[in-house]
Image: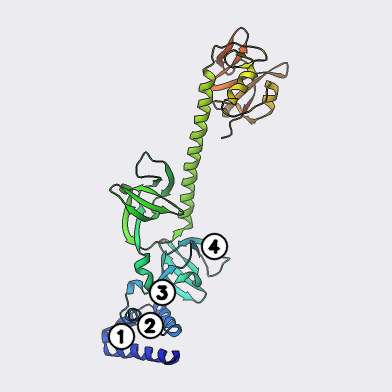
Amino acid sequence: MTKRVRKIATYCLIGSLAFMGGSKTSYASELPITGISILLNDISENPDFTNKELDYILNPNKEYQDLAIANVANYVHIRSEANTDSKVVGKLYSNGAATILESNGDWTKVRSGDVTGYIKSDYLHTGLDAYELVDKVKTKQATVKANALNVRAKAGTSSSVVGLVPKGYNLQVLEEKEDWIRVSVGDKTGYVSSDYVDISTDFKKAISIEQEQKRMEIEKKRQDTKANKTVSSLRQQIVNYALRFNGNPYVWGGTSLTRGADCSGFTQSVMKKFGIHIPRTSREQARAGKRVSLDKMQAGDLIFYRKNGVVNHVAMYIGNGKVIGAASRKEGIKIKKYNYRTPYRVVSYINR
């Protein structure tokens, strides 16, 4: 039988059954135009239907009649208009689902989650293809109900945080435990507390650009906070190490923290312990590094002093308005107020 004959036979079969079953004819008349047009395209292009496919046409499920599923490896952009120059308003990830609003050849207007816009039709499964994928792509989703939720490497509050997601964000559930749920976040996986999410079986929805930006913003804040804690910890380690030598002797030209050092030998040797290599003399140390204003100095920064317009002394700021440094032969390594002499310049060598 030729394809043309099979097409005619299929149309006749559908028409006959619709005629014999008044309820089906009435039901079909209620179907969205978009859904019908997609089915007719499927029929005209492929008349070799399986029993399941014919059953779908004759007894359609309204819920899936206008279903579209992302046909991409990673994600496809949803745009504000039907062209590639228009604004990106969201992303639909692989196997994510959307409702078809209009179909205009090369572009399909869809709604998914909080996003409405256009996707190139080539990147979507529709009609019978989408119907066949329903059981495969429908998964458990965890919707975040906290303002911001930590995603942890392992199930437990003592585990490290690998990500942060905002309220309303949908996560794919990979595994459920008693109090923790393993989820997928972009290209990462991790665990979230079950107390802060709502679980439902549904399709993956699109992520709006606003949601994506908010997730990135709170993730950046988390990374910045983590970095600041690391820096603060390093600064405190440096200060604590310097304080161990309080009271040790001053030796001009010396660099030994125990047997004796001069002012720049002291700061150089303390920094060297932490892999921070700085010049030998106070004058050279003042010219290198990063200049910091007096009101922005932090523990571990170096403060320089002048005599007759020339830098001749350096000490390390330890916080609370105080410094430690190799002061003189008489005083040795000693803690003083940072302004016991007039500060000339503050320099930071701690860049991480």
Q: Of the numbered discs in the image, which one, if any, rests on residue 25?
A: 1
Tell me if I can see residue 73 in this picture: yes
Amino acid bearing label 2: Phe
**Mark 1 or mark 2, which is nearer the start of the sequence?**
1
Q: Nearer the viewer, mark 2 or mark 1?
A: 2
Q: Quadrant of the C terminus?
A: top right
x, y percent for residue 174: 36, 55
Label 3, on which residue? 129
Q: CA distance from mark 1 to mark 3?
A: 24 Å
Q: Tell me if mark 3 has few (under 14), some (14-19) or many (20+) residues whose alpha carbon lies within 10 angstroms of its own.
A: some
Amino acid bearing label 3: Asp
Amino acid bearing label 1: Thr
Q: Nearer the viewer, mark 4 or mark 2?
A: 2
Q: Of the numbered discs in the image, which one, if any, rests on residue 49?
A: 2
Q: Secondary structure at mark 4?
A: loop
Q: CA distance from mark 4 to mark 3?
A: 29 Å
